[in-house]
Amino acid sequence: MSFLHPEFLYYMLPLIFILFGLLLTQKEAHATFFSSEVMQKLRVSSNTLTLKARNALFFLIAVLMTIALAGPVIKDGKIEVTAKSADIMIALDISDSMLAEDVYPNRLKLAKQKALQLLQLAPNERIGVIAFAKNSYLVSPLSFDHEAVAFLLKKLDTNSITEQGTDFMSMLQVVDKSIKKDSKKYLLLLTDGGDKKDFSQEIAFAKEKGIAVFVLGIGTPQGAPIKLENGEFIKQNGKIIVSKLNEKIADLATKTGGVYIQGVNSDADVKAMLREIERHSKKKELKSEQIEKYIPLFYYPLGLALLLLLIATSSMSKRVKVEVPGLFIIGMLLGSSVPSYAGLLDFIHLDEAKKAYEQKNYEKSAKIYDEYAKHANHNESYYNAGNALYKVGKYKEAIKNYEKATFNDKVSRAKNFANMGNAYAKIGDEASLKKAIESYEESLKLHEDKETRENLEAVKKALKKKEQKKQQQNKQQNKKKNKDQKKDQKKDQKNQQNQQKNQQNKKDQKENKKDSKNQKGSKGSDKKDQKKEQRKSQKPSEEEKKQQEENAKKKQNEQQKQQAEKKKEKEHKKQENKMNKQDKKQEKQKKEEQKKKDAALQSAKVVKMKNRMSDAEEAKWLKALNNNQNTYLYRLNQSSKKKENSNEKPW
């Protein structure tokens, strides 16, 4: 048997012996006034322990507890543990072309998110980071400390390197110097590919140095202009340049034994890339160590100490048997056995929930956290349950848990509001987006956070787009209604005209029938017939007058309606013309402002050209700037002299 922590025996046992030695040798207070013979006659015999006996029991309890703290164990053999890793170096392109917004939010931010996802998905691998543009810099060497690597990665932006451009050869040189030569080198390249068409030199260098390049293409073949922080777009020869994804970079990956994958907005591309790296890589053994295996024995002295403590506190007189404190303690323990057991094992349930969350078994984690939160009214458990439900996609239930979680700490409350805003944003309808904005604003009032600020802006943009779509739909519906009304009016007019024609045709048919009857009558009664015909001819003339008057009234009403419609159309056209004139004025003003800016830029360029320093002075200035810059980036490659190219893109 041996002890894991023998220092407890060395430092605590001598003090315990000295303390209880003094207690055991001291006399009782009444012994100073009475002799031992008198005390025996006065003392009533009982089953209670004497003071010395009780102190002796406490002494044994202290010794046993000290032995338990020392950790007595029995050796049970040895276990050999080996640590293996495939070293992965991440190279992040931070040239100005990575500011293009053809992917959300832009290429650089998306590339940083991909790198952070890789750190989370590969917790057992050594990972380093290189930033490159015209020159390449080591941001972090290969390390298992992924939190430190992530911290340095988040700080990178296009201003971290002064000289802009994209030089893949310098980046490969830094990779070669930062990893040992005797090992296979795996490089994950996050870039838009630059403008180079021929990568034969880079491929030859990578093969010579044993570098397998895996490329994750960031951007789209359609491309986008590059917007700077001041709102202007990068131009060359007075024209705005559109930066596109250079798919020729795939040659650098496939011809060096790696894989090329075009990036997407989800984490599917990172997972696929990690699988490919693990399939191609050979994990090397970093360290092997033998660990002793023990059988713990601390619970034996601890159990005996608790039993002696119960005896020492329960040794009272028979006359007060009911009031024994030991029995009272036992009764309390038995009476409250279930709640106390649950309270003692709460940490086991919480640990189980945490492990389930880490293993991405979010439903199990949410269930455990939710049950514990309802039982104990624990704010952090409500919060964790909300996070697990959010991962499953149950956003409404997650919001309910976030609302129940209340924290005194401002940062914790801010995180709770931010997660609540994320859940509302995932629901996606207009009311939820408004609530998401309110939650983000509450979070930012308590604690300023960059990601929360970006989420707030993204949700505001989404809400604006939805409102614009609604307005467009309403306009289209109004146009359709107006068209339908016009069609209905035309149909009514046609129906009225057809009815009038039908009535006239019927009248003509009646008159023809009457004429035929009159011709068949006797010739002798011509006078009578003539009178009748005159009367008949007079009657239809009056009816025709009435019809003509009715038709005239209808025509007037139709003309009035048509005139009113024409007035409305004229007013609508006038309003549209006014709006078009205002838009044209605004466009003219914008063009004039752009012309002024372009003229100012050209004049500034002329001044720069006049006051331009010589090439030697410029090289000295850049060298001094590189040596004295206040940054955490370290350049490992040597600056090589390159010929100036007038057609080189300004990023």
Image (cartoon, rainbow, N blue to C red):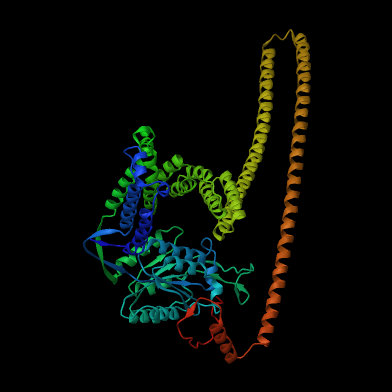
User: Is residue 500 visible in the rendered structure shown here?
Assistant: yes
Above or below 636: residue 155: above
The location of residue 60, given as percent across then percent down, is 31, 52
Camera-side residue of 583 and 176: 176
The location of residue 579, given as percent across then percent down, is 73, 53
431 horizontally vs 512: left or right: left
Above or below 191: residue 74: above
Q: Quadrant of residue 313?
A: top left
Camera-side residue of 553 and 613: 613
Camera-side residue of 159 and 378: 378
Residue at figure coordinates x 68%, y 87% from the top left = 610
User: Is residue 220 visible in the rendered structure shown here?
Assistant: no
Q: Quadrant of residue 477?
A: top right
The location of residue 77, given as percent across then percent down, is 20, 63
The location of residue 300, given as percent across then percent down, is 27, 51
Residue at figure coordinates x 30%, y 68% from the top left = 84
Count of marks placed on residues: 0
> The N terminus lies in which quarter of the figure?
bottom left
Residue farthest along the left direction in this orientation: 77
> The C terminus lies in which quarter of the figure?
bottom right
473 horizontally vs 287: left or right: right
Above or below 174: residue 312: above
Camera-side residue of 480 and 92: 92
